[in-house]
Amino acid sequence: MKNDLRNIFSGKSEIRFGATIQAIAGYLNNGTQASKEIADSKYFKKQEAEKLDSYISENNLWKEIDFSQYVSEGAEQKVYLKDSEHVIKLNDAIYYACWKDYFLNLLLHNYFFPDTAYNLLGFTKSENVIYAVVEQSYVAITGPTDLNVVRKFLEQNGFQNNRNNDYYNPELGIIIEDLHDENVLTRNEILYFIDTVFFVTDEFLS
């Protein structure tokens, strides 16, 4: 599985909605390792954002957003209704030390949870801040999410609960965080992971 993910990160293997994400992640790759801690991360992310801005313009990836369809927002992203089956989410990669880590997060989500895969449509800008524009299937819930069921499901798939709603897969060296009951929904007794926060660790890269 680790080799499969490495091939996806490098663009050697395909994944649902992966082509644009893989292309941008590859463009941003400057030889540094993706991690939660990068020296002088604010400066690094500012430089990276300038590089990303140029890529977006060169590849016509700026998108117009219908802000009248606003639904909700959290610390990570803003949500807008696209139609009866899809939502649009705007994310400025605030949880990540660099944009590349955010794009790897999208690829990890699409690998593990293809039924709610993110489709990167492009980008928008507000007050000089870049936001990724992703489309995701709308999940109509039929009942509350039992976090004990979430834990059991993840443990069966190699992820150990290490604190609150955060999990770690020691075999893969992958962290997944923020899996509370608003980010994991239940429809007809099936779990749908809609907002995940993935990180790769040094163990993944070794």
Image (cartoon, rainbow, N blue to C red):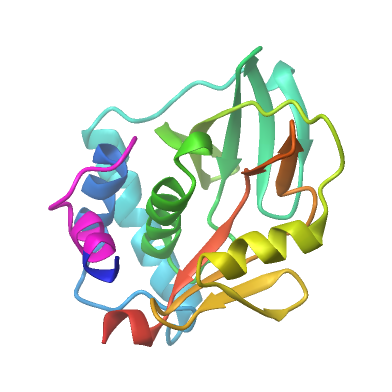
> Visible in this render: residue 204?
yes
x and y, in percent, of residue 25 in the image: 28, 55
Q: Residue at x 71, y 49 (%)?
A: 183
Q: Residue furthest top?
A: 84
- Answer with left or right where residue 62 lies relative to residue 42: left
Up-down relation of residue 48 to residue 183 (above or below): below
In the rendered image, the quadrant that contains the C terminus is: bottom left
Q: How many marks?
A: 0
Q: Residue at x 66, y 53 (%)?
A: 76
Q: Residue at x 19, y 75 (%)?
A: 31
- Answer with left or right where residue 8 lies relative to residue 126: left
**Start-end of magenta stretch:** 4-17
In the rendered image, the quadrant that contains the N terminus is: bottom left
x and y, in percent, of residue 63 in the image: 44, 25
> Visible in this render: residue 178?
no
Up-down relation of residue 96 to residue 66 (above or below): below
Q: Residue furthest right?
A: 144
- Quick one: 61 or 33, which is closer to the camera? 33
- Quick one: 124 or 158, which is closer to the camera? 158
Residue 9 part of the magenta-drawn span = yes
x and y, in percent, of residue 96 in the image: 52, 66
Q: Quadrant of residue 137?
A: top right
Up-down relation of residue 16 to residue 28 (above or below): above
- Quick one: 15 or 79, which is closer to the camera? 15
Q: Residue furthest left?
A: 12
Q: Residue at x 71, y 18 (%)?
A: 69
Residue 168 part of the magenta-drawn span = no
